[in-house]
Image: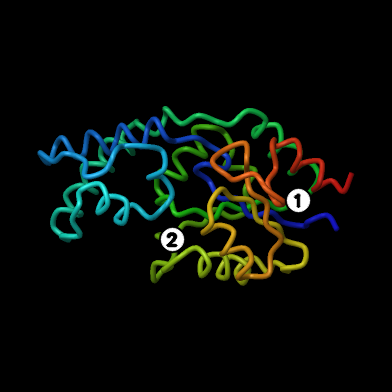
Amino acid sequence: MSPRAILFDFDGTLIDSARSILAGFELALAREGLRPAVPLSPSLIGPPLPKTLATLAGTEDPAVITQLASAYREAYDGGGYRQTEVYPGVHAMLEALVDHRISLHIVTNKRIAPTRLILDHLGWTRWFKGIYALDALEPVSPHKTALVREVMERESLTSSRTWMVGDSAEDRSAALGNGLRFFSAAWGYGAAGPDGLRTPEDLLHLARGA
């Protein structure tokens, strides 16, 4: 059955922010006189910012995390986000899904401020009926499963006609925890497998019911 709505994760699913995010992390650590406790690699991308910074700094000291977050946001929101890359075929897929009258929504762990900056930069804002992030809700959503639940309620979506596309185990858990059909974006950071799609065109093909 074709979907009426699709929820998309952002980083690692529609866009590849690895280069810009890792550059921001490196600059933030350098400004605070810290060396990364773990290698700076794309595997760090995905969890909420405070959690990632704690991993990088090797400490959960609130004062340290606050300083690092401030330095990171200054670098990334100030222009670093423009280095964001789009996975091949994603732009055409989104446009075609909208033309097919499928309602599109963003559900991301990324902060809402840079999420909106990137969407505007790419010219995609008009395609998404809803743009949701953990920090966009009041109170802040504790995890993605709760975020998806809130989106379903706010947008009056039906689980049987709503799909979710992401690249992580957390995305899969959030989808299944809300009764949604899930697809792994294997063209990005997603894993291959029974629910893995190799290209954005594969998702478009399924969504059209072809």
Q: How many labels does the image show?
A: 2
Q: Which residue is drawn at 14% across and 53% down?
A: 64
**Residue located beneath label 2 in the image:** 134
Label 1, secondary structure: give it. Answer: loop
Q: Nearer the viewer, residue 33 or 155?
A: 33
Q: Where is residue 90 in the image (x, y as percent from the top left)?
A: 65, 34
- Check disc 2 and give the amino acid type: Leu
Residue 202 at x, y percent in the picture: 76, 39
Q: Is residue 190 left or right of residue 47?
A: right
Q: Is residue 137 above or below residue 49?
A: below
Instruction: Please report the residue visible at 43 percent of the width from the left and 49 percent of the height from the top.
Output: 46
Q: Are marks 1 and 2 in contact (CB under 8 Å)?
A: no
Q: Which residue is situated farthest in the left direction here?
A: 33
Amino acid type, residue under disc 1 in the picture: Ile
Determine which residue is flagged by label 1: 102
**According to the image, what is the colour scheme of the structure?**
rainbow
Corner quadrant of residue 31: top left
> Which residue is nearer to you in this view: 75 or 128?
75
Residue 40 appears left or right of 164: left
